[in-house]
Image: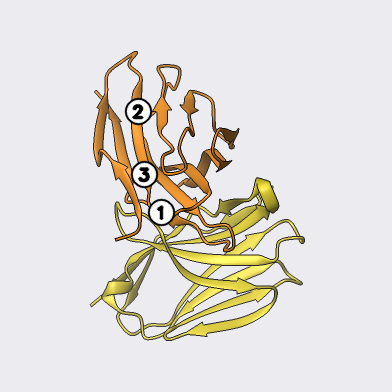
Chain colours: A orange, B yellow
Amino acid sequence: DGGITQSPKYLFRKEGQNVTLSCEQNLNHDAMYWYRQDPGQGLRLIYYSQIVNDFQKGDIAEGYSVSREKKESFPLTVTSAQKNPTAFYLCASRGRVYEKLFFGSGTQLSVL
Amino acid sequence: QKEVEQDPGPLSVPEGAIVSLNCTYSNSAFQYFMWYRQYSRKGPELLMYTYSSGNKEDGRFTAQVDKSSKYISLFIRDSQPSDSATYLCATPNSGGSNYKLTFGKGTLLTVNP
């Protein structure tokens, strides 16, 4: 089945630790996105990438980093500089023609 | 002023009620408007997609855009408990190579049997 796979479903971070969230898609989409969702805050854009080896900061990029070495993969690293990382993280992709974003099932990140 | 404003609710209605969900936007250049539905701890799914002004109907759902007042609405007729979810309005705020969606905060809807 075509779709977007996010892993792990739940992730715990210790103080001062970097953690990486995985996002893989087999839809052959060019563009990929990372959003953060906090209760009552809606979805806020962290980073996005329109093509391989290129990405742009979104509205809340501080404390996060990404890479786009392959079309299928867009991992997000939550660094120790992100002081409030507890949130639900959503990855999405978009094909070349349509405006619609397809979302993965999300990763819940919590701080120990 | 935020680009997309949405009342977060929560909204609780009895089964069979007509539900009205609303958003306002600030940029008159916006032309595409979307409604996503998100069940608890799941990824959002596209529910309705409209271009420019007017109404679009899909089964029990109607999306309405009023560009003169920068107001978008989603109506749900004969609401069902399975409609209980968070509803997010969204609009692309840039095109081409800089395309990205801006979302409202979402409205949590509960339909009680």
> The residue marked by circle 3 belongs to what chain?
A
Are the numbered discs 3 and 2 placed on the same chain, yes or no?
A: yes
Label 1: which secondary element: strand
Q: Position of residue B36 (x, y in %)?
A: 46, 63
**Neighbour tally class for label 3: few under 14, some 14-19, many 20 plus, Cα within 10 Å:** many
Q: Position of residue B113 (x, y in %)?
A: 23, 78
Residue at 41% from the left image edge and 27% from the top image edge: A77
Residue A20 — which label?
2
Q: CA distance from mark 3 to mark 2?
A: 13 Å
Q: Position of residue B20 (x, y in %)?
A: 49, 75
> The residue marked by circle 2 belongs to what chain?
A
Label 3: which secondary element: strand
Q: Amino acid at mark 1?
A: Phe
Q: Amino acid at mark 2?
A: Thr
Residue that mark 1 sits on: A103
Whether residue B98 is situated above or below residue B113 in the rendered picture: above
